[in-house]
Image (spheres, coloured by chain):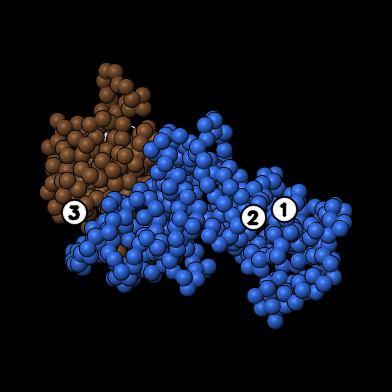
Chain colours: A brown, B blue
């Protein structure tokens, strides 16, 4: 049996968790998406994750890295705990368009505080192309992270771009251990 | 031994006999051994004297015979431009050499050096750079490796003597005043090789100056060379130019080019520094060791030498990182913290993850 390790993606509805996992996964992702009913202001956004997204990176012949995407809706937050178990870190994707983005940050860091004590943490600002003042927003997020007595890289990312998602993960890895050596 | 097969063939056009003799001696020097003087085709590069009595005629004949060959023109004062490369007399030998190297089609890809003078003939520049010029790129550089081969013993620099410092201050001003600014100035009287604007609304730089020229501009020490870079408010609609990048992307890259492994003088190597926040590496050139340095300095405050030793990163990379981070306002001086070596039970797993993710 291969060893299974885990990375968790969290964040509010529509922040790009499913998209990021799809961009990373070596296998087609297993998703429990449901069609969003009613009017939705985001024309792109027709599905929402109701239980979990599940992707995988085959690290090598010994290990799989499972990619867990949690549902954005808070009424599914019992899934958050399940996903967080045995994870090496949390990638929090915050939707740059949301006016209550800083509250989202507090809610999710609170919900995942156990994971944050033991594991790594990195924040991605998604939909950054629609952010008026990215520097200002990044400053505010950093300030809030400091206030919560956490340390985390905060990068803008487009979850549709695999390279950018990979960069955020690499930042998380170095945060966990700066002495890692890049072998190419 | 001079290798005549690989040496770039250089032809002199229109120089008086005495100067030809001087050039002949110069080209025998060891540091010019990558070049050889020839007086007939085939040639790789020409050096053309614009002060000669029949300079116009010489130029016409040269261009008729060698329509594609790059030419460096030289004269006492700027003349009507004949091509993208012009050097003032007395010719700075270092500038001449690096310009020759950069134009040598067989050579390694060296960039024009700091003192290289470039004119504004866009058509010529675009023709010459067809291969070298990159399209709009988010990272604004073709490689993420830094080049330290030009690093001198002098390992610190005064950022305000460079375009980097001018740009940094201009961005601060733009933020405050919300007006666009334009780069104005000259290089020994010759115009800049294109336009560059700072835009307040989208926090971006737009420019049609090619990266390789920007790199050359970034190395010009304004206190030593007859060049001027200033930013002036620009109250007209800014024309659309080929490159538009976030100003942090641009300033970071400019900073890396200028630093070349040197430390800004404002950063005292005997003091410890920490990052106020991570550089946004999805917008910035993530050069070798950059993530590692960011992770260390986000958590700890360190002296440059110590972080280099502890993390086994060559000091020039640390210097470049600190200089660029300082230009972006991400650096803060703070008493050194003793970082405990990470006792990470999953280090081996993390290492494998990194390897897998870097392998693409
Ligand atoms: N332009 C742009 N679109 C994005 C970005 N991030 C995500 N999207 C789009 O936003 C939509 C929502 O993304 P999802 O991946 O479904 O979001 P989610 O986090 O899984 O949402 P829930 O499952 O509902 O919690 C998709 O159409 C994405 O393509 C971004 O940075 N820029
Ligand atoms: Mg989803």
Up/down of B1 relative to B187, above or below: below
User: Residue B198, position in %: x, y?
Assistant: 48, 40
Q: Regarding mark 1 in the picture, which secondary structure is present there?
A: loop
Residue located at (59% from left, 54% from top): B227
User: Residue A76, position in %: x, y?
Assistant: 16, 33
Image quadrant holding the N terminus of chain B, namely bottom right
As measured in the structure, the alpha-carbon distance from the residue carrying label 2 to the one carrying label 3 is 57 Å
Q: Which circle's residue, 2 or 1, is located before the other in the chain?
A: 1
Q: Are the residues flagged by discs 2 and 1 in contact, CB closer than 8 Å?
A: yes
| Nearest to the observer: residue B130 or residue A3 | B130
| Nearest to the observer: residue A18 or residue A143 | A143
Q: Identify the subunit bearing mark 3.
A: A
As measured in the structure, the alpha-carbon distance from the residue carrying label 1 to the one carrying label 3 is 63 Å
Up/down of A120 relative to A100, above or below: below
Q: Nearer the viewer, mark 1 or mark 3?
A: 1
Q: Which residue is mark 2?
A: B188
Q: Regarding mark 3 in the picture, which secondary structure is present there?
A: loop
Neighbourhood count class around disc 2 (C-alpha, 10 Å): few under 14, some 14–19, many 20 upward: some
Q: Identify the subunit bearing mark 2.
A: B
User: Residue A71, position in %: x, y?
Assistant: 21, 35
Q: Where's ligand 2: which quadrant?
A: top left
| Nearest to the observer: residue A128 or residue B258 | B258
Q: Identify the subunit bearing mark 1.
A: B
Q: Nearer the viewer, mark 2 or mark 3?
A: 2
Residue located at (40% from left, 63% from top): B265
Up/down of B337 relative to A103, above or below: below
Q: Which residue is mark 1?
A: B78
Q: Which residue is mark 3?
A: A119
């Amino acid at each position: 049996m291969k060893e299974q390790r885990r990375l968790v993606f969290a964040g509010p509805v529509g922040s790009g968790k499913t998209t990021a996992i799809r961009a990373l996964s070596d296998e087609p992702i297993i998703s429990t998406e449901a069609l969003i009913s009613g009017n939705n202001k985001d024309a792109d956004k027709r599905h929402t994750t109701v239980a979990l997204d599940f992707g995988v990176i085959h690290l090598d012949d010994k290990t799989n890295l499972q990619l867990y995407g949690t549902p954005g809706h808070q009424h599914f937050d019992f899934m958050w705990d399940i996903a967080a178990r045995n994870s090496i870190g949390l990638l929090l994707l915050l939707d740059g368009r949301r006016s209550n983005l800083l509250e989202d940050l507090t809610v999710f860091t609170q919900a995942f505080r156990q994971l944050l004590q033991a594991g790594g943490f990195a924040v991605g600002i998604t939909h950054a192309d629609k952010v008026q003042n990215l520097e200002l927003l990044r400053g505010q997020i950093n300030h809030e992270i400091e206030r919560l007595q956490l340390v985390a890289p905060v990068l803008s990312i487009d979850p549709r771009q695999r390279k950018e998602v990979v960069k955020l993960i690499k930042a998380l890895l170095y945060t966990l251990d700066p002495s890692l050596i890049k072998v190419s | 031994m001079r290798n005549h097969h690989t040496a770039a063939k250089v032809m002199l056009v229109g120089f008086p006999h005495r100067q030809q003799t001087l050039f002949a001696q110069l080209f025998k020097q060891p540091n010019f051994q990558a070049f050889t003087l020839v007086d007939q085709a085939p040639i790789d590069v020409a050096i053309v004297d614009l002060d000669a009595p029949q300079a116009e005629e010489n130029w016409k004949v040269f261009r008729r015979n060698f329509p594609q060959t790059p030419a460096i023109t030289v004269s006492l004062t700027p003349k009507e431009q004949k091509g993208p490369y012009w050097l003032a007399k007395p010719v700075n030998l270092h500038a001449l050499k690096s310009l020759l190297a950069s134009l040598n089609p067989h050579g390694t890809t060296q960039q024009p050096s700091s003192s290289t003078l470039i004119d504004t003939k866009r058509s010529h520049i675009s023709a010459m750079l067809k291969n070298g010029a990159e399209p709009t790129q988010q990272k604004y550089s073709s490689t993420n490796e830094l080049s330290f081969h030009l690093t001198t013993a002098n390992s610190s620099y005064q950022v305000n003597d460079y375009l980097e410092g001018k740009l940094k201050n201009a961005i601060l001003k733009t933020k405050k005043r919300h007006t666009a600014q334009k780069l104005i100035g000259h290089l020994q009287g010759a115009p800049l090789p294109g336009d560059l604007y700072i835009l307040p609304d989208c926090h971006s730089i737009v420019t049609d100056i090619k990266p390789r020229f920007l790199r050359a501009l970034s190395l010009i020490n304004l206190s030593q060379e007859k060049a001027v870079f200033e930013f002036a408010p620009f109250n007209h609609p800014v024309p659309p130019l080929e490159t538009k990048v976030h100003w942090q992307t641009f300033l970071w890259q400019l900073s890396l080019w200028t630093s070349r492994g040197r430390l800004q003088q404002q950063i005292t190597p005997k003091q410890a520094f920490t990052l106020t926040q991570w550089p946004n590496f999805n917008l910035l050139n993530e050069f070798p060791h950059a993530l590692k340095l960011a992770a260390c300095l986000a958590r700890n405050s360190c002296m440059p030498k110590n972080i280099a030793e502890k993390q086994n990163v060559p000091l020039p990379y640390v210097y470049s990182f600190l200089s660029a981070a300082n230009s972006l306002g991400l650096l803060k001086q703070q008493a050194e913290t003793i970082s405990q070596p990470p006792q990470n039970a999953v280090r081996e797993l993390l290492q494998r993850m990194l390897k897998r993710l870097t392998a693409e």
